[in-house]
Image: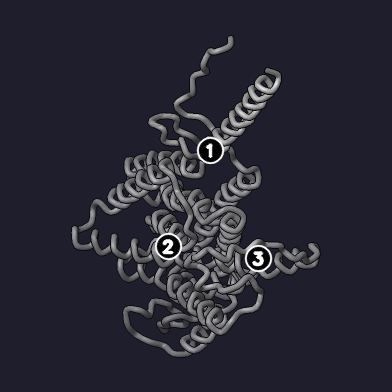
Amino acid sequence: MEGEKTKKRCISFGKCNSKYCYLIVGVILINLLTLVILFSSLIYFIKNNIIYSNLINLLSYSFLISLGESFMIIPDLILTKSISSKKEELSIDKNSHNPITYIFNEYSVDFSLKEKVYLILAAFLKLFLELFFISYQYFIEKDYNFIKTLTYSFQFELIFLFLLSKKMYNIQFYKHQYFSIIILTISGFINFTVKYMEISIGNFFLFLFIHLFYSFLKSMITVYIKGLMEYKYISPYKACYIFGMINLIIVTIIYLIVSFVPCDNVLCQVEYNGQHYLGNILGIINISGLFILLFLIIKAILLVFNYIIIHDFSVCHSFLLIQFSQILENSSMVGLNLDNDNLKFFIILIFFCINIFFILLFLEIVEINICKISYNSKKNIQKRALIDKELSVSDYEDNNDDEEIEEDN
């Protein structure tokens, strides 16, 4: 009936790009494959009494992850040959003053000296984070768990990606997005508290600072790589392997040197031929090392998926990937009987579901039609613009009719 107002539901669905959905499904399937590889490798290590600290240590992790990322040159070469090169036409807004333009001064494949310096610094920062990833678990948390070492995740990357993308790209966010990021940040702190509720107060704040520090630096790398792809036409595959190759050269040189220098201190945990080393490259040239390399190649593929998403959409669209990496850690610990605290896992799982909902709200895939929370979503803005356009056309026609009547009179 005319004049009858249709009631809006409290929760409705917005628009979701089909390519984004396919990428997320791919990420979920790869995470499941990751669990299978972890489970298989753990069984192999147990059967053969392998000490995994000889395989995953300060240098071997950085070496193998850089090697895995370097392999992404293969799909990049295949795509380069199969797809004809096209010049992208981009309209450059000369009046924009985004801070990112101070890093990349022009839309060009050529790198200036300043940009080369930034690239090398970013590669060193990424290498530092990889070394820090293992060092934190081995020497600060002092947890030598095989599964946790490979699947460990830091908690606060979401908030820093949000803040840095807003600062560097001058992106305008709305009420539903601020509301979502506040809930996600609170949830992150609760998850962190649940995870470390049994440690001392001093260590709790130490770990909290480290998580914030690491998450901030990793978010900076992500935002920088987004700039590389947007301003320098770097493909997601190249963004992966270019850092992998730079770091692989550095780590390989160091690795070869320390492989022939035995040592005897807390850092030297690698045992080979009855002696201890900071790292020994010969200790990973076996089937066990292939298991770890295969896992890290899968991790590099996930990284490429992440880069594709931030290239085609935004850095904030990588929120879902971060959540999946965090639940992967907890599910692998419980699924492989490495964490018997089922209550803790249940609480983390509840907050995982809450986080997924608010990430979907942030990305406008889900809308909350209460208190005008989603009032400024893209879908609602377009709907209001269409209504305004129809009203303006109607007013224009009414004015023309009035003018015609006046002329007739």
Q: Which mark is residue 381?
A: 1
Q: CA distance from mark 1 to mark 3?
A: 32 Å
What kind of element bears circle 2? helix
- Tag 2–tag 3 contact (CB < 8 Å): no
Q: Is residue 193 left or right of residue 153?
A: left
Nearest the eye: 252 or 179: 179
Nearest the eye: 40 or 311: 311
> Farthest residue in the left direction?
201
Residue located beneath label 2 in the image: 149
Q: Quadrant of residue 94?
A: bottom right
How packed mark 1 is, by other alpha carbons closer than 10 Å (few <14, some 14-19, many 20 or more), is few
Q: Is residue 80 above or below residue 198?
A: below
Q: Residue at x 53, y 77 (%)?
A: 119
Q: Residue at x 50, y 58 (%)?
A: 42
Q: Which mark is residue 235?
A: 3
Residue 326, position as x, y percentages in the image:
44, 52
